[in-house]
Amino acid sequence: MKTIKLNQMEENSKITPEELKQVTELNNKMVQIQGEIGAGELRKADLVTMFAEESKQMEVIKKELEDKYGKVNIDLKDGSYELIPEEEND
């Protein structure tokens, strides 16, 4: 392993303009990516909430249909349905 000795920092020590440009550009890209990740997470949270709301509505409709038609399997292509046979308890 190679050891690099660093000189004590001088008061006016600076990296080269090219190095500063390179570091600044990378930092800006990283900040942008972090922002996009955050926006993605917010969008994900919104979608999860929307899905939960739709699921609640589906449960309400399923209950209404079950009350009207009994326990059925519905073909979502044409709306036809088949009764689900009830299991007999011994």
Image (spheres, grey):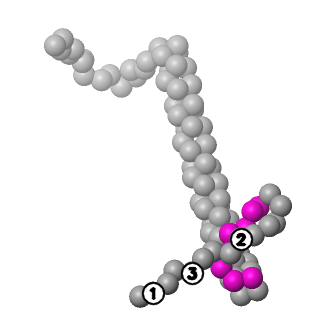
Q: Residue at x 61, y 43 (%)?
A: 36
Element at badge 3? loop
Give the total of numbered labels.
Answer: 3
Element at badge 1? loop
Residue segment shown in magenta: 69-76
Element at badge 2? strand
Label 3 crowd bin: few (<14), some (14–19), many (20+), radius 10 Å: few
Distance from Cα at disc 1 to Cα at disc 3? 9 Å
Label 2 crowd bin: few (<14), some (14–19), many (20+), radius 10 Å: few
Q: Quadrant of the N terminus?
A: top left
| 9 displayed left or right of 42 | left
Q: Position of residue 52 (x, y in %)?
A: 62, 69
Residue 7 or residue 49, whichever sits in front? 49
Distance from Cα at disc 3 to Cα at disc 2? 12 Å
Identified by mark 1, the residue type is Asn
* Residue corresponding to mark 1: 89
* Residue corresponding to mark 2: 82
Q: Residue at x 40, y 22 (%)?
A: 12
Q: Residue at x 52, y 26 (%)?
A: 26
| 90 displayed left or right of 58 | left
